[in-house]
Image: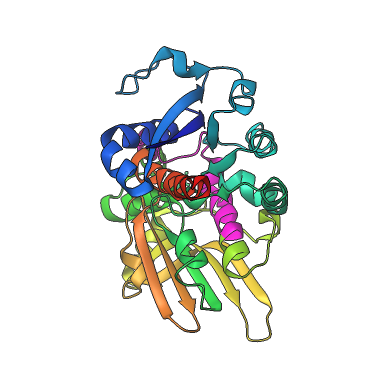
């Protein structure tokens, strides 16, 4: 069986999730890819943390060059988070002929064209399903089976942390701080949760979604963004009385004249709206195409296993291509 080697950059929640998924579902992944996929090197400083799985010590390195310069590594998964050094590492991996997979919406949204062009120039794949909606296969859907559509609107609950906080404040009357602390402990929040609660994480995801659905890249700084830090228990109670819930919504719309509207903001949704019942760390993307009409994708938008599922799905897609090219 064709061996495909992966270099993993980052062994936090997402790296550990991906590693465990390969361990747990090795036979299924081998069957679906036709390849024997292995983690060959892991860039990570913290080699001793209890991750709930045995990782051979000789896999760890603290030198990214050991991944770039290893001719046996075919694919690099970047899950370091943050824009730098993650972006430099991904571009460097591409220049060394490695296919790159990432969950890093902040890095992609900050410099989308550079990633796409560098991947093309180096004839490698750049896949980022895990960057939007965690385990929800929305990007692959937009770029493959929905390819016969022109998209007109996307409405999304795209951040697990804020949806978790709003749900706990609404359903259990938890304070904002307690709910945020829980979201952090469950591994949903970004290392600096400011990006979650101020809406920047959703703006990054709206930017990625628009690049694929509308073929237009908008830098997240240009997406009007309001987070949830101003949402008070009183506002939540008021919405309840109006038979509504407050959700942080990422929105992108293509008007008939081709102009685009986009924003991130808390919105009062009637309890009848399909997005109103999306709770806790769950995400949902409600998308309208001119052929398929309305669709809703629902699933866990954060966490090691759901996001690891999307990362490993991208690994399988690339491994299949490597195998075919080898024939
Ligand atoms: N911090 C993000 C969230 C992680 O809470 O949704 C997934 O992108």
- The image shows a total of numbered marks equal to 0
Main secondary structure type of the part rendered in magenta: helix
Compared with 252, 92 (above or below) is: above
Tell me where the magenta segment starts and ends, as one range.
181-208
Q: Does 231 sit left or right of 278 as displayed?
A: right
Residue drawn at x 33%, y 43% as measured from the top left: 29
Nearest the camera: 104 or 26?
Answer: 26
Residue drawn at x 65%, y 60% as measured from the top left: 223
Compared with 35, 290 (above or below) is: below
Compared with 59, 261 (above or below) is: below
Q: Position of residue 58 (x, y in %)?
A: 45, 13
Residue drawn at x 46%, y 48% as measured from the top left: 314
Q: On the rendered image, what quadrant is the N terminus found in?
A: top left
Can residue 248 be seen at all in this image of the molecule?
Answer: no
Nearest the camera: 313 or 201?
Answer: 313
Q: Position of residue 326 (x, y in %)?
A: 51, 44
Residue reaching furthest to the bottom: 256
Q: Does 30 sit left or right of 93 as displayed?
A: left
Q: Position of residue 206 (x, y in %)?
A: 57, 60
Can residue 189 be seen at all in this image of the molecule?
Answer: yes
Q: Position of residue 64 (x, y in %)?
A: 62, 23
- Residue 252, by quadrant, is bottom right
Here the colouring is: rainbow
Magenta region includes residue 14: no
Residue drawn at x 72%, y 52% as measured from the top left: 117
Magenta region includes residue 186: yes
- Residue 261, by quadrant, is bottom right
Nearest the camera: 103 or 220?
Answer: 103
């Amino acid at each position: 069986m064709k061996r495909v080697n992966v270099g993993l950059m980052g062994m936090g929640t997402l790296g550990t999730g991906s590693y465990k998924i390969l361990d747990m579902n090795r036979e299924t992944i081998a069957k679906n890819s036709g390849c024997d996929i292995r983690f060959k090197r892991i860039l990570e400083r913290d080699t001793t943390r209890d991750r709930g799985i045995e990782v051979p010590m000789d896999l760890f390195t603290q030198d990214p060059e050991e991944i770039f310069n290893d001719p046996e590594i075919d694919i690099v998964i970047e899950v370091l988070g943050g824009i730098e050094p993650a972006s430099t590492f991904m571009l460097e991996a591409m220049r060394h002929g490695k296919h790159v997979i990432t969950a890093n919406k902040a890095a992609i949204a900050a410099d989308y064209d550079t990633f796409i062009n560098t991947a093309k120039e180096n004839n490698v794949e750049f896949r980022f399903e895990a960057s939007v909606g965690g385990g929800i296969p929305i990007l692959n859907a937009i770029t493959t089976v929905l390819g016969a559509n022109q998209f007109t609107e996307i409405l999304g609950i795209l951040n697990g942390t804020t949806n978790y906080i709003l749900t706990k404040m609404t359903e259990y009357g938890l304070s904002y701080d307690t709910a945020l602390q829980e979201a952090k402990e469950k591994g949903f929040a970004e290392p600096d949760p400011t990006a979650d609660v101020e809406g920047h994480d959703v703006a990054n995801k709206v930017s990625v979604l628009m690049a694929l659905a509308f073929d237009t890249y908008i830098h997240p700084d240009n997406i009007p963004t309001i987070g949830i830090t101003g949402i008070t228990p009183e506002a939540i109670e008021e919405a309840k009385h109006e038979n509504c819930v407050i959700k942080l919504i990422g929105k992108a719309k293509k008007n008939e004249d081709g102009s685009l509207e986009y924003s991130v903001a808390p919105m009062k949704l009637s309890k009848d709206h399909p997005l109103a019942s999306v709770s806790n760390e769950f995400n949902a993307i409600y998308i309208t195409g001119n052929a398929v009409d309305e669709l809703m994708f629902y699933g866990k938008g954060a966490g090691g296993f759901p996001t690891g599922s999307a990362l490993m799905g991208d690994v399988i897609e690339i491994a299949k291509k490597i195998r075919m090219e080898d024939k």
